[in-house]
Image: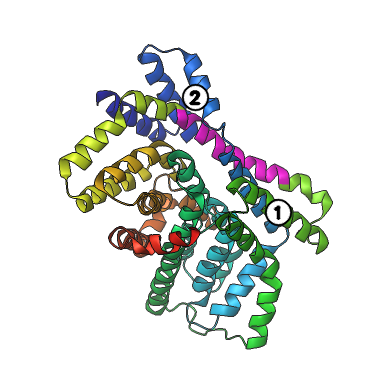
Amino acid sequence: MLTVALCFLGLILLIVLGFPIFVAICLVGAAATIASGDSLMLVVTNIFGGIDSFSLMAIPLFILAGYVMTECNITERLVDLSDALVGRFRGSLGHVNILSSMFFASIQGSGVATTAAIGPIMIPPMIKQGYDKDYAVAVTASAAVIGPIIPPSIAMIMFSYYTGLSVARLFLGGLIPGILVGLGLMTVNAVYCRIRGYDAVPRPHGIKSVLRAVVRSLGGLMIPVIIVAGIVGGKFTPTESGAAAVIYGLIYGLVSRRLKLKRLPAVLIGAARTTAAVMIILAVSKVFANVMVRAQFQRIVVEQIAGGIGNPWLATLTIMVFLIFLGSFLDPTVLITMFATTVAAVGAKLGFDPVHYAVLMAITMLLGAVTPPVGSMLFVSCSIARLPIEQSVRVLLPFFAVLLAVAVAVLFFPQLVLIPAGWAG
């Protein structure tokens, strides 16, 4: 138990001191490995083992597909579609931001990528229209959380890799919670806009305008159809569906002439950089995870929480609070890598359905992405708006409350996950 406590304290200390997350994880893991009497060769072996998986190849493919479709200007088309659908309502720019994030998430599967794609398009117009900077940042960051919840989802792929659960069931299990998050955020936006006087004059669109926007966006919206239908129908593995999405994106871009061959190197480099940022964390987290396994962290958690508390609902709420606290310092990718197998074991001990519990914990771990000081989606949004991160916290609270409320609803109403997950067979 002492080893576990020292590892987490050391990790948080290094992050607070300004070390990059992957460096902090690697240093703590390596120090604990050496302190236990093992060779540094074990560290190297774990780093390579952390990403040596056919299933994880789906992650760079989904990222590349998102970059290809972004290069085809699909992001702007999705924003236009969202405006055509919800521009008639007060607070329309906030609604467009949220709906655009949902559409783009169904192509990319990454919250940070969604923030980076939607933020530059939506935050400046919101500020110009009279929205406060902190509010534009709060809407963008909270909406981006939908990305790793609805299918396709990189977070669900990772959970599948570490727990052995069906990717198709995890994908579909996140569908209703993701939609509920979107509707909840729109509700908060509608109330906020009335209180603050944003977008007092809505922008109505006729049926022709809506149909035109649907047709222009149809090419991009085919990607989630290909991915989800292929996996759920048993035609593709997650990795194969990622490859199919890339091939479709290239064909769509070249045939429509929206993707120029001379831009392909830049697209590939951008996707490679994003992939490297994700995979280096997965690689070094394996070192830390190995230390936790040797320290019997999973057994301690199961005994102390599942066995000690007894009540499955209270035990799960305790774990959720613990993960939200850690999410203030660790990226969701790190949390999933470190705790996916542990929370799966706890869920099994408490008698929960494994898919239900995995989706619940994935949503809980994503809450940290919008909480300071490390929240990656909040950080990207603040960078776009050139706003200090601490100035965004107060206005973010109602949006965070929606995310938390959906997580609690998923806990107490497992059918929100299990009904759609059952469609995968």
**Residue 363 falls in image quadrant:** bottom left
Is residue 20 something one can see in this rendering?
no
Circle 1 sits in a helix, a strand or a loop, which is it?
Answer: helix
| Disc 2 to disc 1: CB gap under 8 Å | no
Up-down: is 148 above or below 273?
below
Label 2 crowd (10 A; few <14 / some 14-19 / many >=20):
many
**Which kind of residue does numbered mark 1 sit on?**
Val
Image quarter of the N terminus: top left
Up-down: is 29 above or below 347?
above
Label 1 sits on residue:
68
Label 1 crowd (10 A; few <14 / some 14-19 / many >=20):
many
Residue at the image position 49 percent from the left and 70 percent from the top: 131
**Residue 29 falls in image quadrant:** top left
Up-down: is 17 above or below 377?
above
Give the extent of the magenta segment: 268-286
Residue at the image position 31 percent from the left and 33 percent from the top: 298
Label 2 sits on residue:
46
x and y percentages locating residue 224 in the rendered image = 60, 61
Which callout, 2 or 1, points at the residue further toward the start of the chain? 2
x and y percentages locating residue 291 in the rendered image = 38, 25
Residue at far bottom of view:
206
Spatial CA distance of label 2 from label 1 is 32 Å
Image depth: mark 2 or mark 1 in front: 2
x and y percentages locating residue 39 in the rendered image = 45, 12
Nearer to the camera, 363 or 118: 363
Residue 282 forms part of the magenta stretch: yes
Query: What kind of secondary structure does the magenta stretch mostly adopt?
Result: helix
Residue 389 forms part of the magenta stretch: no
